[in-house]
Image (tube, helix red, strand yellow):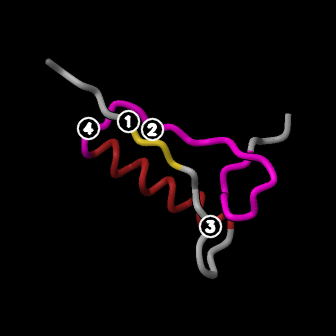
Amino acid sequence: MTYTLSVLDLSPVSGDNTQAQAVRESLEVAKAAERLGYHRFWVAEHHNIGGLGSPAPRS
């Protein structure tokens, strides 16, 4: 039996980090997930939550 694994990232903003830093850190997590062979990298979309750096882009 074969399983594929994915990563779900929220881009958390912690400590003195900014939302931009959180997104940059998420990029590093995505690169690591790719190196480790994960199948997909998902980014959660949340609105109006200051502790997360992954809001939906304006359309």
Question: On the picture, is 36 further left or further right than 9?
Answer: left
Residue bearing the label numbered 2: 41
User: Given this view, does label 3 or label 2 mark the residue nearer the observer?
Assistant: 3
Q: Earlier in the sequence, mark 4 or mark 3?
A: 3
Q: Please determine whether, in this image, residue 14 is positioned above or below residue 46.
A: below
Q: In what quadrant of the picture does the N terminus appear? A: top left
Amino acid at circle 3: Val
Mark 1 and 2 residues: CB-CB less than 8 Å, in contact?
Answer: yes
Q: In what quadrant of the picture does the C terminus appear? A: top right
User: Given this view, does label 4 or label 1 mark the residue nearer the observer?
Assistant: 1
Separation (CA) of disc 2 from disc 4? 11 Å
Q: Is residue 37 magenta?
A: yes
Q: Earlier in the sequence, mark 4 or mark 1?
A: 1
Per the picture, the main secondary structure of the magenta-coloured stretch is loop
Separation (CA) of disc 4 from disc 1? 9 Å
Helix, strand or loop at label 4? It is loop
Question: On the picture, is 22 further left or further right than 30?
Answer: right
Residue drawn at point x = 63 percent, y = 81 percent: 16
Disc 3 crowd, CA 10 A, few/some/many (<14, 14-19, 20+)? many
Residue drawn at point x = 34 percent, y = 30 percent: 39
Residue 6: assigned label:
1
Separation (CA) of disc 3 from disc 1? 21 Å
Amino acid at circle 4: Gly
